[in-house]
Amino acid sequence: MKLILAIINHDDANAVTQSLTRNGFSSTKLATTGGFLMAGNVTILVGVDEEKVQTVIDIIKEQSHSRKQMIPTTAEMTYGYYPSMPVEVVVGGATIFVVDIERFERV
Ligand code: 2BA
């Protein structure tokens, strides 16, 4: 068995979980925060048999969209800092990890 952890944009979370449910997969949604932007995102957990991993990844991929986000940065001068200069970063579609599950039980 495998555990898929997918970090996605908050705005895509319902579409992803609804599509997973429609296709017969159980999922759990966690409210998380990205370490770089310090902004809210969503992490979805899906436990599946190994042969279903690609199906789940395809569903997540289909429902997750990348977005451009502007973040303020400051550049250092000799004496102090330049005013805040926005920089564009591309966030998502989805960051996906697949890990082995040693044991799975529902008691
Ligand atoms: P954040 O850490 O808030 O990162 C948001 C976006 O900022 C990233 O999008 C990337 O485009 C940019 N970014 C992140 N770290 C950067 C850095 N050190 N320098 C320059 N730009 C940087 P994504 O790569 O699509 O990541 C979206 C979210 O997925 C991340 O939010 C984080 O929550 C998670 N994530 C991505 N890679 C990860 C990893 N290796 N381990 C754990 N979480 C990860």
Image: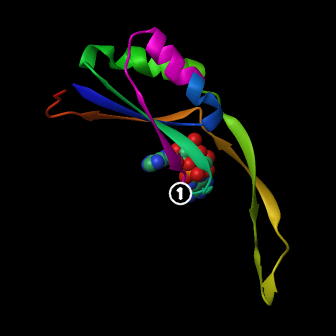
Q: Which residues are magenta?
A: 15-35
Crowding at dot 1, Cα within 10 Å, few <14 / some 14-19 / many 20+, comes out as few
Pinpoint residue 45: horizontal percent, then vertical percent. Answer: 39, 33
Residue 37 part of the magenta-drawn span? no
- What SS does tag 1 mark? loop
Q: In the image, what residue occupies the spot 63% across and 41% down?
A: 91
Q: Nearer the viewer, residue 79 or 69?
A: 69
Extreme residue in the right direction: 83
Residue 19 relative to residue 28: left or right: right
Q: Residue furthest top?
A: 23
The quadrant of the image that shows the C terminus is top left
Where does label 1 land, which residue? Answer: 35
Residue closer to the observer: 23 or 52 = 23
x%, y% of residue 6? 45, 34
**Which quarter of the figure is the N terminus placed in?**
top left
**What colour scheme does the image use?**
rainbow
Image point (55%, 52%), residue name: 34
Kindly tell me whether mark 1's CB lies below 8 Å from ligand 1: yes
Query: Residue 88 in the image: x percent, y percent?
Result: 75, 49
- Horizontal placement of 97 versus 72: left or right? left
Q: Is residue 54 above or below residue 10?
A: above
User: Residue 87 is drawn in which quadrant?
Assistant: bottom right
Q: Is residue 81 above or below residue 40?
A: below
In the displayed orientation, state which residue is furthest to the bottom: 79
Amino acid on which disc 1 is placed: Gly
Which residue is at 32% across, 14% downward? 52
17 magenta-colored: yes
Task: Give x and y (percent) for residue 57.
Answer: 44, 22
| Above or below, comparing residue 98 to residue 86 in the picture | above
Quadrant of res 97 = top left
**Residue at 60% in and 37% down:** 9
